[in-house]
Amino acid sequence: MLAYIVRRLLWLPVLLILISLITFALGIYGPGDPVQVMMGLHARPDIIAQVRKEYGLDQPFPVQYWNYMTNALRGNFGYSLVKYQGQRVSDLIAKRLPVTLQLNLVSVCWSLPLAIALGIFAALKRKSWLDVFLRGMVILAVSIPVIGLQPVLTFLFSRKHEIGPMTLGPFLPVGGWGGIFSPQVILPAFILGLGVLAVFTRQTRAAMIDVLNADYVRTARAKGLKEWMVLVRHALRNALIPLVTLIGFVLAGMFAGSFIIESFYGIPGVGQLAYDALISKEYYIIMAFTLMIAVVYVLMNLLIDILYVFVDPRIRYK
């Protein structure tokens, strides 16, 4: 097991070098010139050349890439060229990262336990009208895009509604950030966790249906064990393997998906920073985000492999 983990960790720098090389090449040779964007369309060519030389963008590609990677290994991902001129990219990310982590934490805490519970319930009530209803809601939740759900929820919860002589609302704030326990977190965390709820409800239901028909579950019931013990200790534990496989990639995907939510609701997290970077062609910030997301996916994949051993002791790595 230890040798397997060491081999996976040794592959991590290789993967990051490949990803950083492709990202850096796209940033250098892709459409748009960040210096031109920073200086404006009417800037003099000699001034543009001087600024490009100041940032080292006039050097050959291998030299630029080497300088960037050596600085990145020391925690220096460069400086903002356009919107946050003069500010270090690492400082911008470090300031906003806790906000994104808090938003993702709230989303997971409400959606994941509820999804597992609904999946177990749907498996126990399979082929009933409750099962059909839950599956319909799951398909609906997966089908609705964020860009369509956000304005609807904003309209319902942020406006006053007159019903006869009564005036209801607004019920929730729909912008800004007041911390993990503020009411501003409710709507974005709900939208962000809705996809997790739908995916894990369906996956838990499918995994539990397969496990509930197994011989060891029937044996556990024949021994007179309580139903909750059969479900938790025997059925759910063996159904966790596909769920563990899924959870790592879903959590990493939530980290990237929160970019859209944060830009919609004006949450000062890394998502809004990434959105501003794409609009402003801040390719130093874009490269830093790409590397960060790559690290998250690779580490999540390694964590999944380690968790397999604890979920199912029969799994061993050589």
Image: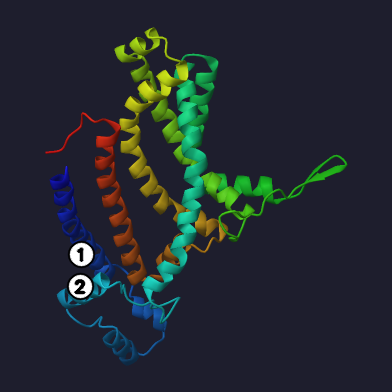
Residue 24, horizontal then vertical, whole percent: 24, 67
Choose between 135 and 251: the one closer to the eye.
Answer: 251
Residue type at numbered disc 2? Tyr
Considering only vertical position in the picture, is 40 above or below 214? below
Precedes in sequence: disc 2 or disc 1: 1
Q: Quadrant of residue 276?
A: bottom left
Where, quadrant-wise, is the C terminus in this rendering? top left
Q: Is 298 on the left or on the right of 243, as rendered?
A: left
- Kindly tell me whether residue 88 is visible in this rendering: yes
Asked whether the residues under the numbered discs 2 and 1 touch, taking CB atoms below 8 Å apart as contact, a structural biologist would say yes
Residue 185, horizontal then vertical, whole percent: 58, 52
Q: In this view, which residue lies farthest toward the top?
A: 222
Choose between 30 and 237: the one closer to the eye.
Answer: 237
Describe the element under mark 2 as helix, strand or loop: helix
Residue drawn 28% across the image and 45% down it: 303
Where, quadrant-wise, is the N terminus in this rendering? top left
Q: Residues within 10 Å of mark 2 (few under 14, many from 20)?
A: some
Residue drawn 39% across the image and 29% down it: 203
Task: Provide the residue designation for mark 2.
Answer: 65
Residue drawn 34% across the image and 70% down it: 283
Label ID, residue 21? 1
C-alpha distance separating marks 2 and 1: 8 Å
Q: Residues within 10 Å of mark 1 (few under 14, many from 20)?
A: some
Residue type at numbered disc 1? Leu
